[in-house]
């Protein structure tokens, strides 16, 4: 007999039919004569109820069916007597594929804290919460590829190892095969990287953008979707050392086209989640509602599904950095000295400022544009005011910055001048600069932090809980 997925079995109304399912026991309860097993196989958040007539089965087998055990069960699909499900499975044959010693198995049918589950990240997929999060994560990855494919963008695989440290987006992780105890040295006593694997210092990439631009200048519209690495020592709920980024790069797009794409992209993804992940979203929404009950009224956040509907249906605010600074300076928290970080034209906005703009002032997602050139990367298009660049950050409720992007400087001379001002090694970047020498054209792009987006969609509070195995300072277990 062919195994069926529980999601299909639950949908089917073919009572009387014999089916075979395989999965893990979530709970077992019952009486002397009859047992009820909730079986989950990961295909859906819902369990299939297995009805077991005790007299038909071996005692020892039934004793070994405990939470976490893996089973193969065949039987007859029947109309369910109990509430909560349409159909249930009357077990005819049960095979214990793998037991789970109840004294040792950490994931018991009770509420575990997220901290405990992080320490047991190898088993946390087996909880409803993480099942829901990782199914949604998958659906969003799929929706991203679908979105770009339908728009004629090409998926481009940019390198993970890079020898250029010009990306400037953060501290990098070195990649080296040199002996760390006795590295070869030059006559001057410095480490001799010519003898390293790549013949020069190499790092894990912080962004695929620079290579992405090369692709866009021939293929037209490309996107990357891969892991990126930052050795920044920021222990926040929004930073990982290893995270996934989606970076579209488009020829012939100006900043407005770039904003239009970012807004449509985010809304489409949220719409996809609402249309395709409702069971999991509903579970997470309920979970969140329980959690919010313990918070004071004024700190509660919007209901999850309502929040997703609202963002999917709203027009994002577009506002310049300069206007944002003025708004912040006129704000209550500023006047009452409630902001921890300073607000002044020229400083980078912190997430407390970003969240004020989105959650309190505009009450909608905000795209901030035209940032001071001093706080942005060398490749951003220089505006005529000589002070700002054509950057755009998309700010979301609860998250703050979710997308960072810009129109790119296409003028060779302006770009080189800026690189020199910022101490970017111009010679090393000859390949990047070649795009500005041969057929240069206006172009734009942005980077969406995948985990930040998943935080938003799932309503989870900590970025460590939306990636299977988080890498953060002092933490690379599993
Ligand atoms: P932040 O100021 O929040 O650290 P950033 O300005 O360093 O972000 P960018 O370099 O513009 O971010 O990266 C593009 C996107 O990647 C960000 O908008 C964010 O969604 C995501 N991102 C950046 N750093 C991290 C990180 N350490 N962990 C997870 N996502 C990140
Ligand atoms: Mn950062």
Image (cartoon, helix red, strand yellow):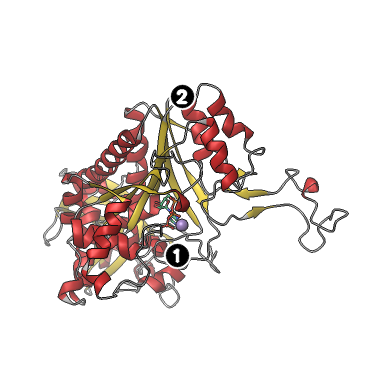
In front of the other: 370 or 145? 370
In front of the other: 110 or 359? 359
Marks 2 and 1 close (CB-CB < 8 Å): no
Q: For the residue with label 1, is its CB less than 8 Å from the closest atom of ligand 1?
A: no
- Give the CA distance from mark 2 to mark 1: 40 Å
Q: Is residue 306 left or right of residue 442?
A: left
Q: Residue at x 43, y 38 (%)?
A: 381
Q: Residue at x 61, y 48 (%)?
A: 423
In front of the other: 193 or 351? 351
- Residue 179 location (% of width, % of height): 78, 58
User: Where is residue 339, by image quadrant?
Assistant: bottom left
Mark 1, residue position: 121
Say if 312 sits above or below 343 in the image. above
Mark 2, residue position: 219
Secondary structure category for the residue under label 1: loop
- Residue 101 location (% of width, % of height): 44, 72
């Amino acid at each position: 007999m062919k195994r069926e997925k529980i999601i299909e079995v639950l949908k089917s109304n073919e009572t009387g039919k014999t089916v075979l399912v395989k999965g893990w026991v979530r709970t077992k309860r019952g009486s002397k004569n009859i047992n009820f097993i909730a079986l989950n196989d990961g295909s859906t958040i819902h369990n299939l109820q297995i009805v077991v007539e005790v007299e038909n089965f071996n005692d020892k087998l039934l004793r070994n069916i405990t939470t976490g055990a893996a089973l193969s069960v065949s039987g007859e699909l029947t109309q369910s007597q109990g509430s909560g499900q349409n159909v249930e499975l009357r077990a005819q044959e049960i095979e214990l594929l793998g037991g789970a010693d109840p004294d040792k198995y950490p994931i018991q049918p009770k509420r575990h804290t997220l901290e405990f589950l992080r320490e047991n990240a190898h088993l946390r997929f087996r909880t409803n919460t993480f099942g829901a999060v990782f199914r949604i994560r998958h659906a969003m990855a799929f929706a991203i590829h679908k979105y770009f494919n339908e728009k004629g963008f090409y998926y481009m695989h940019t390198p993970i190892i890079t020898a250029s440290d010009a990306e400037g987006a953060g501290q990098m992780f070195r990649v080296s095969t040199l002996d760390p105890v006795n590295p070869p040295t030059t006559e001057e006593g410095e480490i001799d990287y010519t003898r390293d694997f790549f013949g020069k210092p190499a790092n894990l990439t912080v962004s695929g953008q620079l290579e992405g631009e090369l692709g866009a200048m021939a293929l037209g519209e490309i996107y990357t979707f891969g892991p990126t690495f930052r050795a920044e020592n920021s222990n926040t709920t929004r930073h990982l050392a290893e995270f996934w980024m989606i970076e579209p790069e488009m020829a012939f797009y100006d900043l407005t086209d770039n904003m239009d794409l970012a807004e449509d992209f985010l809304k489409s993804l949220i719409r996809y989640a609402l249309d395709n992940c409702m069971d999991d979203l509903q579970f997470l929404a309920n979970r969140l509602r329980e959690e919010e009950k313990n918070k004071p009224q004024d700190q509660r956040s919007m209901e999850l599904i309502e929040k997703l509907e609202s963002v999917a249906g709203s027009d994002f605010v577009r506002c310049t950095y300069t206007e944002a600074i003025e708004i912040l300076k006129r704000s209550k928290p500023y006047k009452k000295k409630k902001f921890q970080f300073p607000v002044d034209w020229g400083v980078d906005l912190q997430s407390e400022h970003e969240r004020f703009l989105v959650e309190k002032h505009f009450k909608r997602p905000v795209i901030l544009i035209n940032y001071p050139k001093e706080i942005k990367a060398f490749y951003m298009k220089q505006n005529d005011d000589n002070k700002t660049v054509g950057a755009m950050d998309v700010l979301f409720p609860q998250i703050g910055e979710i997308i960072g992007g810009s129109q790119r400087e296409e003028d060779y001379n302006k770009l080189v001048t800026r690189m020199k001002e910022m101490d970017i090694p111009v010679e090393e970047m000859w390949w990047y600069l070649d795009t500005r020498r041969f057929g240069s054209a206006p172009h734009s792009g942005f980077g969406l932090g995948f985990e930040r987006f998943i935080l938003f969609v799932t309503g989870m509070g900590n970025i460590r809980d939306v990636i299977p195995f988080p890498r953060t300072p002092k933490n690379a277990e599993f």
